[in-house]
Image (cartoon, coloured by chain):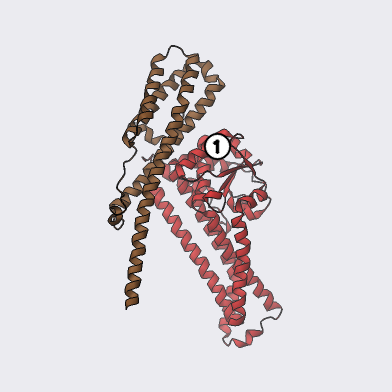
Chain colours: A brown, B red
Amino acid sequence: MELIIIGVVVLLVIFAIAQYNRLVRLNITVDEAFAQIEVQLKRRADLIPNLVETVKGYAKHEQSTFDAVVAARAKSTSASSVADVAAADGALTNALRGLLAVAEAYPDLKASSNFLALQEELSTTENKVSFARQFYNDNVRSLNTAVATIPSSFFAGLAKVGAREFYEVENPTDRNVPNVKF
Amino acid sequence: MAENNFRALQSANKSKTYFLLAAMGALTWLVAYAVMTYFGVGTASTMVPMAVAFALIGVWGSYYGSDKLVLTMTGAKLITREDAPELFNVIEEVVIASGLPMPKVAIVEDSAPNAFATGRNPDHALIAFTTRILEVMDREELEGVIAHELSHVANRDTLVSAVAATTAGAIAILSDFLMRLMWFGGGRDRERSSNPIALVLSLVVLIMAPIAAMLLKSAISRKRESLADATAVSYTRNPAGLRKALEVLAADSTVVRQRSNAVAHIWIESPLDGQAVSKMFSTHPPIQERIATLRAMESLGPNQG
C-alpha cells in the first residue's frame, strides 16, 4: 500500500517537473527566436549605408527617398519592445521598397555588380527576417497555448512564464510574402 | 485553415510511422517465436540475440557515421559559403525558418537533378545537391527542396530508417540462418516439438518474414517522405515551391548514377523508381501523388503566421 502511494507521488513529481521544464523551455525558445529576428534586422540595417551610397552614385536627385530610408533605419536601431521593433521593421521595409523602386529607373545602376551583390544580400536578409518572424510567432503560439491550457496552465505561475506578444507587421501583405522579390 | 492542414498531415504521418515501427517489432517477435517453436528454446535464446546484434552493429555503424559514409558512397564533396553564396543564402533562410542548426553542405557531380540529407542528429546533418539540380531550379523551387531535406533532419529520419533497417536486417539474417540449418540437418531438436501444425506454421513465418520486413521498411520510408513534404511546407509556408520542384524532377527522366543501391532511399526523388517491382516495394510515394497533395494545400490559400 505504501509502495503504491510512494509510486503515485513520484509520478506526480515527475509530471510536475516535466510541465515546469516544458514551459521554461518554450519561454527560452521564444527569447532565442526574438534574438534571431534582431540579428537579421541588424544585418539589414548594416547593409543600408552601403546600399544608399551605391544608389546615390547613380541617382543623385532622389534625396527624399534616401532621407526616408536613413530616418527609418535610425528608428529601427533604437526600438526595443516587440511592438516597436515590429513597427520600425515594417517602416524600414517600405522605405527600402521605395529605394529599390527608384533604382529601377537607372539601368546603369541595375547592371552594376556592386548593386547586384547588395540586392542579393538584401533580398536574402529580407527573407531571413520574415522566416525569423514566422519562427518566433510559431513559438509564441506554442507558448501561449501551453500557458492557457490545462494542465500546463497550473504551472505557468510557478515557472514565472506568461503569454508573450506576437510579432505583428503593420502591412498585412507582408505576412504572405516569405519570398521577397524586388 | 491551411495551417491546420499541414499540421494534421504531419501528425497523421507520424502516427502511421509509429504504427509501422510497431508492426516491425511484432514481426521480429513473431520470427523469434517461430524459431523457438521450431528449434526449442535452447537454440533460439542464443540465435535471436545474435541476429539482432549482427544487424545492430552494421546499422549502428552506418547511422553513426552516416554523414561521412554517405559522402563516400555518393561521391559528394563538401563546399563552403565561397563556393556557392546564393545557395548558402537560401539554405540559411530555411534554417532560420526551421530553427535547426546550419547543416554541412555538399555537391555531387551528376547530370540528374536530385538532393538528399543525412546525419545522425541535427548537429551532424549534411545536405547534398547534384550540380544539375542547382542549374535547373530557381530560388523558390530550391527553397522547397532544401525545406524537404531539412525536414528529414528535423524528423530524425536517419534514425527511423536505421531502426527499420536493423529490424529488417535481423529478420533476414535469422530467417536465412534457419533455412540453411534446416537444409543441412541442423534441426535436431525437431523431434522435441510434438505439434506438426506449429512446425509448419513456423516454417511459413520464416519464409514470409523477410518479405514482410522489406515491405514494412519500404512503407516506413514512404511515410517519412510524405511527412518531410508536410514539414517542408510548415517551414516555407509555400507548397507551390516544393510542388514546382517535384514537377521539375518528375519531368526529368535522367537518374542519378548510383554507386550503390544501399543509399537509394535518401534522395528526394528515388533513383530506382523506374525499375521498382511494384508500389509496395518502392521507397518513395509516387511523385504525382506528392504533387497532388501539395497542390491541395495550395488551393487552401496563403496562410498568415
Q: Residue furthest top?
A: A61
Q: Position of residue B98 (x, y in %)?
A: 46, 44
Q: Residue at x 38, y 27 (%)?
A: A92
Residue at image mark 1? B88
Q: Furthest-right residue in view?
A: B184
Q: Label 1 lies in what chain?
A: B
- Residue B126 visible in rendering: yes
Residue nearest the observer in this picture, B218 or A96: A96
Residue B197 in the image: x percent, y percent? 56, 83
The percent coordinates of residue B163 (x first, y second) are: 55, 61
- Examine the rendered structure and indicate whether residue B226 appears above or below residue A78: below
Q: Nearer the viewer, residue B61 or A14?
A: A14
- Would you identify the image quadrant in which residue B57 lies? bottom right
Identify the image quadrant of the N terminus of chain B.
top left
* Residue A22 or residue B233, whichever sits in front: A22
Q: Is residue A94 visible?
A: no
